[in-house]
Each structure stands twice: as C-alpha cells, then as structure tokens.
Image (tube, rainbow, N blue to C red):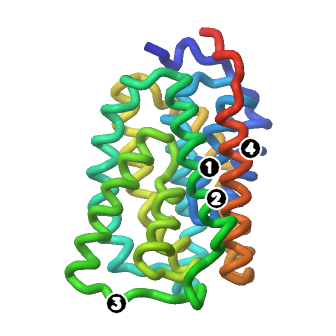
Amino acid sequence: MTDIASAPRANTAVALLGGGVAGFAAGLFGVGGGVLLVPFLVLILRQPQHIAHATSLVAIVLAALSAVSRFGADGSVAVVGAISLAVGAVVGAKVGATFLPKLTESRLRHLFGIVMLLIALRFLIAGDSSSSGDAMPDMTPLLIGLHVLGGLAAGVSSAVLGVGGGVILVPLMVMAFGYGQHIAEGTSLAVIVPTAITGAVAHHGNGYTNWRLGATIGVGSLFGGFGGAQVALGLPPGTLARMFGGLLLVTAFLMLRERKEVAP
C-alpha cells in the first residue's frame, strides 16, 4: 500500500504557488480546486496518486472557505440547497473513502480523466443552460430529496477522485436542478467544506492524507480563492461555464496521457 513515508518531499515555495493557482480556480469555478490540485500533486510534486487524492482534500477545505465567503457576501449561496446536498455528500465521502485503496494508480488516474472529459464536453458544447447566473429553483420536498441523492454521488466522487465534489455538484445543479452558474458555484463551495473534511479524515485512516503538505498548499489557496470568486461574480454565466469546460478538458488530457508511475 502506498503511504506518506514513501512519498517524495515537496518544495514549500512551489506548493504555495500551486495552492494559489488552484485556489483562484476554486473561486472562479466553484470546484474546490481539486481538478488542478490532483494533477499538480502528481505531475509537479511527484506524489503517488493515492496520496495526491487524499492530500488535495486538505487544501480544498481552505480554498473553499476563502471563496465561499465572497459568494456568501454577494448572496450567491442557496442555503437550503447547500444543506440538502451536504447531507448526502458527507455520507458519500465516507463511502467513497472505502473504495480508494481498492483502485490501482493507473485505474484511478484514468477514472479521474474520463470523468473530467465527459463533463468538459458538455460545458464546452452547451455552456450555461440557465437564463440567469442568479437563477434558483423552488425547493419542493421532491427536489430536496434529489439534492440529497445528488450530494451522495458527489461525496463518493469527492473521496475517490480527490476533488471537493464541485466538478459533480456544479454540472448537477446547472443541468438537472436549474441553478444559474453563479448560484451553483457559490452553493457548491459551501457543500465542499464539510465534504472535503470528511474525505480527508477518512483517508487518514488508510495512511494517505499528508496533512502538512495539504495545509501548506491550502495557505496559498486562501489568497487565490477570494480573488477567483470576485472575478467569477463579474463574468457572464455563459462565459464562465465555457471557461469551466476548458479547465476540465486540459485536466482530462493531463491525467489520461501515459506517464511513468512514481517510484516508491
């Protein structure tokens, strides 16, 4: 089993810089930053895939906290929707953490890339399907139940893929629940905080979570997260959605291309 002791040491300055970039992406796209952090940890800091997926969740907590504070100040967080999604996501993160040790490095990397590719194509082709970045659905009992189920799926994805869940939550809210892009991103970030905490703690039991490295990256993400959220709120929803798709497309390419495994 891959563990922290076998992982190479990371340069602090590079970790902080990478955290800043990922934090900006988190605030800009409402995704927590894992879509950049996992490739950054694997390809730049040369961390084993399992450790990268677990450690990214630590940094994601700080990035999401910073970004959601800006969305919240703008009123771009759906409180009932966030709570409903979080209920399912926290449970899903615990379930997903049990799957991670069963997947090989190569399979885990390819799974991450395929999920990113599929979602990227949808956003690049269709953009934002809602009429307004501030659109919000009426929360009927049925829709609340669907939020819980959607959160469950996002939580499992969060723990397995090493992302905060935003890459699942934002498309789900925009495409299936009728949220505008801005509200979807702000709400996603609110859900990401407890989801990422749950996943990081669960992975710690398997020896995968590097708390020190995650916190170092997270410090950098604090500064980027707020700035990314500020930029996002000033962009048209359609433009923001297609930028989101472009980010996922690049990430999918990086993770699907063949590379040599990190030596223990």
Question: Residue 121, which numbered label?
Answer: 2
Q: Quarter of the image holding residue 14?
A: top right
Question: Residue 117, which numbered label?
Answer: 1
Q: Nearer the viewer, mark 3 or mark 2?
A: 2
The kind of secondary structure element at disc 3 is: loop
Viewer-closest of 174 and 100:
174
Question: Residue 185, which numbered label?
Answer: none
Question: Residue 138, which numbered label?
Answer: 3
Q: Quarter of the image holding residue 138?
A: bottom left
The kind of secondary structure element at disc 1 is: helix
Along the polypeptide, which appears first: circle 4 or circle 3? 4
Separation of residues labelled 4 and 3 (CA atoms):
39 Å
Separation of residues labelled 4 and 2 (CA atoms):
26 Å
Q: In the image as oriented, which residue stretches furthest toward the top?
A: 264
CB-based contact (under 8 Å), mark 1 and mark 2: yes
Would you say 98 lies left or right of 63 here?
left
Along the polypeptide, which appears first: circle 3 or circle 2? 2
Q: Which residue is mark 4?
A: 18
Mark 1, residues whose alpha carbon is within 10 Å: few (<14), some, or many (≥20)? many
